[in-house]
Image (cartoon, rainbow, N blue to C red):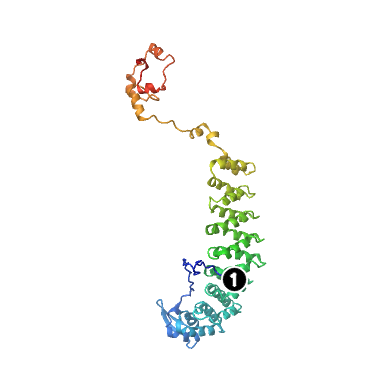
Amino acid sequence: MSKEYIARDPRTGKPLNVAKSKSKKQYIETEQGPWMAIPDQEIIPLAMGAIDECKIPWRSKDYHLTRKDGIMALTRIKGVRANEAHKALLLGLDDDEPEIRVASLKALPEVATQKSDELFDWLSVLLDDGDLSVRKAASEALSFSAPVFPSGVDIIIHNELRSSDKNRSKAAFKGLDLLCEAWPEVACDHIDELFLEPDAELRTRGAKLLGKILTKGGSAGWDLISWALNDHESSVRRAAAKTLPRLAKVDTRIATILAERALSDSDSQVRVSAVKAIRLLDKDSGRAKELILKGASSRDLNVRKACIDMLPILYGEEVLRGIAIDLLKTETDSQLIKSLNQLATDDSLEGSEATKNRFLAPAPAVPKLDREVAEAAGKRIGLEPVMPDNKQEEITEPQPAELNSNNPKGSSLYRSISQDEMMGYDDDEY
């Protein structure tokens, strides 16, 4: 792993004052029980076997606690008495009784935060203990210790990840999962080594952790995604491709490059994940548009559908019609053909009469002033207004002679008005 880049002032060479993200402090969860009520001065004697038992009240009950409870209470010892707690824990790890060794393993991660000498050596030994309960406790202690002591358990977790025992391997991957959040650069090294394993299951499980290191792993994490996308096993590529949509939110440039490669993958699930990532890219990016056009003619029906659905978002009506017409020449799916026909149709030219009318502009309204002048001169503009029934009865029907003399061809509801008539001018006066 390369050292972290430090931005410096070109004139002074001093590091620039930039904001730093706060690292999440790791805490070890310790088991709660009656031993939490043991008096401090009795914890060490009870844990080392100097006294056989201790009677204490806890949560309205009385308990008779023994050595294993005293060992569990070692997690409460801090500061100057840490050496005594460490010595008592080493004795418990080497005890002949399995229950004492189990209790010691449960207390190990917390006691190690005060003093860790020889503790992880014992952890490595007890992972192969003859008693099943001790082995399980050792695996749990490893998973809890991984995010807090990455260097102390580095070799141990490397071996446990590849264990033939599924329970031990599962606990090691749990520790690696926690390591991805606490120490992503260390987790990247472990995942990198997993990708070199011939076992496809190990590579797949490693690829499933790539999403954990996406934001903190930096360029090392992007390289791991790229390598996983080149794996010959489809399950590894699928797991890596699922990180692409999240990567598109972190770094669009890298996501575009990797999505373009995944779009040509032989596995359909990888291609679909690539399309999901492309949909999150900048819609104004020319490269994103090219990838969508490429996907619209893909052999995969799901990819074509996803890309065709995005075309109206990326292109205007004129360009969209041309693209749809070109895609119709090769499309075979009936649903997509129907969608493309809708995109290729210009309703203002090819639609029904009612559809065409929606695109027509309405006639301009007659200005209010012109209407008032025309009405003052006794002229009618536009269609005859509808009158109330009582007024319609008062209007007498004109005689046929008057109809023939005034308008031989019959009256009309609408007559065009000249400008002179509208303004009240009479040519006979001149």
| Residue, disc 1 | 167
Is 155 displayed left or right of 361 in the figure?
right
Which quadrant of the figure has residue 36?
A: bottom left
- Which residue is rendered at x = 34% and y = 24% of the image? 375
Return the x and y of residue 152 as percentages of the image width and height: 56, 77
Percent of width and height locating residue 407? 41, 15
The answer to which of 95 and 308 lies nearer the viewer is 308
The crowd level at tag 1 (other Cα within 10 Å; few <14, some 14-19, many 20+) is some
The answer to which of 230 and 47 lies nearer the viewer is 230
Going by the numbered disc 1, the residue's amino acid type is Asn
Q: Nearer the viewer, residue 109 or 98?
A: 109
Residue plotted at (39% across, 14% down): 406
Quarter of the image that includes the N terminus = bottom right
In the image: residue 381, left or right of residue 4: left
Residue 284 horizontal/vertical position (percent): 53, 50
The correct choice, above or below, for 403 with respect to 23 in the image is above
Residue 132 position (above or below residue 389)? below
Residue 143 in sight here: yes
Q: Is residue 388 something one can see in this rendering?
A: no
Residue 421 drawn at (x, y percent): 37, 21
Q: Residue lying at the far top in this picture: please name it.
A: 401
- Above or below, 268 against 168 in this view is above
Secondary structure type for disc 1: helix
